[in-house]
Structure formats: C-alpha cells, structure tokens
Image: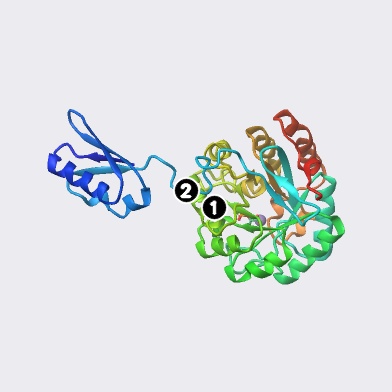
Amino acid sequence: MVVVMSPDATDEDVAHVVEKVEGVGGEAFVSKGVVRTIIGLVGDIESFHHLNLRTLKGVADVHRISDPYKLVSRQHHPDRSTVWVGPAGHQVPIGPDSFTFIAGPCAVETAEQTLEAARMSKSAGATILRGGAFKPRTSPYAFQGLGVAGLEILADVRRATGLPIVTEVVDARDVPVVAEYADMLQIGTRNMANFGLLQAAGDSGKPVLLKRGMTATIEEWLMAAEYICQRGNLDVVLCERGIRTFEPATRNTLDISAVPVVQATSHLPIIVDPSHAAGRKDLVVPLSRAAIAVGADGVIVDVHPDPETALCDGPQALLGKDLRDLAQACRKLPPVVGRVDAAELVRTS
Ligand code: PEP
Ligand code: MN
C-alpha cells in the first residue's frame, strides 16, 4: 500500500501517518520528493484499512498495490487449477490442460426435450450437460423453470447419458436441494453479487460455476469468487457471459479479453458462454472459436431440439448445421492451442 501526501503536508503530518502504521505493527518507508512525499507501507493490509488513512491530515490518496483477493489469486497459488465435475468414477476436468465443451438446453422444459437436447449435445462432443431447473428471469411473468421436477428430469437424463450436470441455483434456500441432484452449481449473472447465495454455494461441497455479473468488473467478479472460496471450497470455475455496453447489436458484449486477464491474475479455470453473450445463434460458433483461440478452458452453449417452441432463449439455441459446426470447432481448434478434449482426461477412479 502506498500513501501519497498532499503538497502542503507538514513533517508532523508525515510523522503522524508513520506513527499510526507502526502502531498496528506495520513498517512505513518515507520517500520525500521535491513536491510530494509518498509513504510505502509493508505489513497486514487489513489492519491498515482499519486506520482510515485517507481521513488523516495531509493525506491526498492511498493506493493498493497487491490484489484485494487472496484465495483466488495467483500470487499465493501460481499454478492454474483444475476443477473436477461429476460423481466419483466419472469426473470431467475443467482446467488448463483440457478443453471442456458443456452444452444443453437453456431451461429444462420436459423430460423428452431435455433428453433430446442432451443426446444432441453428447453426439456433438459435449462432456457436461447444462440445463436450468430454476430460471432467473428478468420478467416475473416469464417461465420460471420447473424447480425440483426439473432437477428430477436432469437426474434421469444423467442416468441415460452419463453426462454430469451443471444447473443454476437462484436462492440460497434451494442450495441443499440443487446440490443433492447437481454435479455443479451455477450462479448466474443476476446473482453474482448475492453474497449469501455465494456463501451457501461455497458450503455445499459441490463445484460452482460463477458467471460474471453483467455490469461487474473483473475485480468484483473475482471478489465474488473469493466469497465461495472463503467457505473452504476452491472448486470454482468462472464464466464470461458478456457484459452490458452501449452496443445494441448483440444482447451483451462478449469481453473476450477477460479470459487472459483473469488467467494472469487468478488460478481459477475460466470458460465462455457465447450463447448468453450474443443472444443470437449465428454468432455462437464464431464466438466459440474466439474463446478457444484466446485460451478459454471451455465453452457452455445452449442447444434445443426445437428452438421455435423453446420457453427460454430459443433465438440463441443451436441445432443442425450450427451444432455440427460447433462440434467441429471444439474438436479441431483446442489441439492447435495445446489442449486435449476433456473427454480424454476423465477421471475414472
Ligand atoms: C443461463 O446460463 O441459463 C443463464 C441464465 O445465464 P446468465 O446468468 O449468464 O444470463
Ligand atoms: Mn438462457
């Protein structure tokens, strides 16, 4: 941490800051410039926060140098992590060595639709099934999901296809029931900063897929992940799903640079959701190619056997040629950037 004194700060003001810092066990290194004095602080950053240094006489500014997050940071955990998803005997990796293709319907609507979407996804090469039973909708009049009945369908489809399941939880009270059925809990963009839900998901013992809040900075997103990790659960995968910008041509703007930025600062795996970023099926394949090229650890994509009748996000759901194109991209491009298909690294013991 660095304290910048104002040009008119007196020697007494500087001495007062030093005294305060030393009072909580820190060290203060004073550097006097022609116009300003700056003071470098070494020690426990949390105790410095309690000093309210900005309020002291003569202090112009206080800057943080190290990351505000700890458990998700590469500063203390230089190697990138792999998160394993699925029951013992069939765990799919999401991490730096592999590329994980996740696909499925936006929402679980019926047993037939979910099974068909899962079969389509599996034949396209997907190794994890997505599907929402609890849907966080912008409108309270829109389809809210089947709830526990949807979880039952997902469990049946897992039995039929062998695909582990990631599904969203929107309310902390539902975490136990969702964790009972799901292999991975998803926290959606609208709940990224719902700290009670993050903590409950952290307590669940299941891996968590944490989507970026649509108006969240990368730092806020990593701080949200820190809430989960603080509960002793480091099995967190981040998901870039587009952010709100001034551009209306796509539903959200996919922040592709978030992938290498996150990988430089955090050890957590990061995947991309081109479906919810674009909101349009014609962009899903090109954005998936971009995600693979930029080094994402996977993609998560909406698939539907009959998008015209979909109760949620039909315009972005893939089938037919689009899905075949995506399958080809997910097969051919990851090896170019040094990754193997997650299917090859599945942990069976
Ligand atoms: C979803 O993946 O079903 C979803 C609702 O995504 P997001 O939270 O990114 O909008
Ligand atoms: Mn959706």
* Viewer-side residue, 44 vs 1: 44
**The residue carrying mark 1 has its beta carbon less than 8 Å from ligand 1:** no
* Viewer-side residue, 195 vs 67: 67
Q: In the figure, is residue 18 to the left or right of 203?
A: left
Q: How is the image coloured?
A: rainbow
Name the residue type under label 1: Ala
Measured from the top left, where is residue 273 in percent x and y? Answer: 65, 47
Q: Quadrant of ligand 2?
A: bottom right
Q: Quadrant of residue 135?
A: bottom right
Q: Residue furthest right?
A: 160
Q: In the figure, is residue 341 to the left or right of 277?
A: right
Q: Is residue 149 visible?
A: yes
Determine whether 285 is above or below 113 in the image. Answer: above
First reached walking from the N terminus: tag 2 or tag 1 = 2
Q: Which mark is residue 225?
A: 1
At x 64%, y 49%, the residue is 279
How many other residues sit within 10 Å of disc 1, few (<14), some (14-19) or many (≥20)? many
How many other residues sit within 10 Å of disc 2, few (<14), some (14-19) or many (≥20)? some
Mark 2 touching mark 1, by CB under 8 A? yes
Measured from the top left, where is residue 142 in percent x and y? Answer: 64, 66
Q: In the rendered image, which residue does mark 2 sit on? A: 69
Identify the secondary structure beneath mark 2. loop
Q: Quadrant of residue 98?
A: top right
